[in-house]
């Protein structure tokens, strides 16, 4: 049951992070790139197609922070974004807290939060 709650917390953490974009530039890509920029930078080798631009998302589960970064979006397809939150999850009677809210809750009530859950992923009990 505890492992299931940790997995649910990780999924909730990712859902919150993926649904929020800060609009900050990421990956060293400037804003306002033309649509064929990546295709012109990455050439075709033999029969392999060049990298195609589009909506791309990368997820990083860290012991300290978890991040979502991407390129493309609904409003401006040429915008890079990144969003990081602390890797903390709290399960309370009133619901689930993630990120900074969970970290703040743990400061008031030690022992109620889960952090460093990346180390627990894949471990069978």
Image: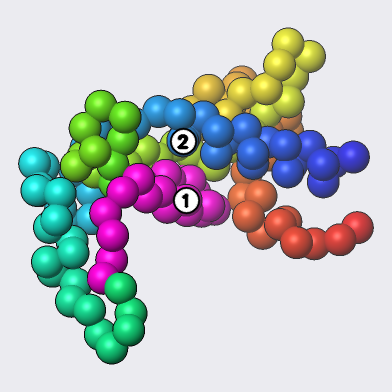
Could you say where residue 29 lies in the image, as x and y percent from the top left? 15, 53
Q: Quick one: 111 or 119, which is closer to the camera?
A: 119
Could you say where residue 123 lies in the image, as x and y percent from the top left? 80, 62
Could you say where residue 21 lies in the image, as x and y percent from the top left? 34, 31
Disc 2 packing (10 Å; few <14; some 14–19; many ≥20): some
Q: Is residue 63 left or right of residue 35?
A: right
In this view of the protein, can residue 111 be seen by the observer? Answer: yes
Whether residues under marks 2 and 1 lie with C-beta atoms below 8 angstroms apart, the answer is yes
Residue 9, disc: none
* SS type, badge 2: helix
In this view of the protein, can residue 107 be seen by the observer? Answer: no
Is 93 rendered above or below residue 5?
above
Which residues are the magenta region? 50-69
Residue that mark 1 sits on:
59
Mark 2 and mark 1: Cα distance apart in space: 9 Å
* SS type, badge 1: strand
Q: Residue at x 51, y 29 (%)?
A: 16
Q: Is residue 32 left or right of residue 54?
A: left
């Amino acid at each position: 049951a505890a492992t299931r709650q940790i997995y649910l917390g990780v999924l909730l953490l990712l859902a919150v992070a993926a649904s929020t974009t800060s609009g900050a530039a990421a990956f060293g890509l400037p804003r306002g790139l033309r649509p064929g920029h990546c295709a012109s930078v990455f050439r075709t080798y033999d029969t392999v197609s060049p990298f195609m631009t589009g909506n791309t998302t990368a997820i990083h589960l860290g012991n300290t922070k978890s991040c979502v970064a991407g390129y493309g979006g609904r409003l401006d397809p040429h915008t890079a974004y990144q969003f990081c939150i602390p890797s903390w999850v709290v399960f309370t009677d009133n619901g689930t807290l993630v990120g900074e809210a969970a970290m703040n809750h743990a400061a008031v009530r030690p022992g109620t939060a889960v952090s460093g859950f990346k180390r627990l992923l894949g471990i069978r009990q």
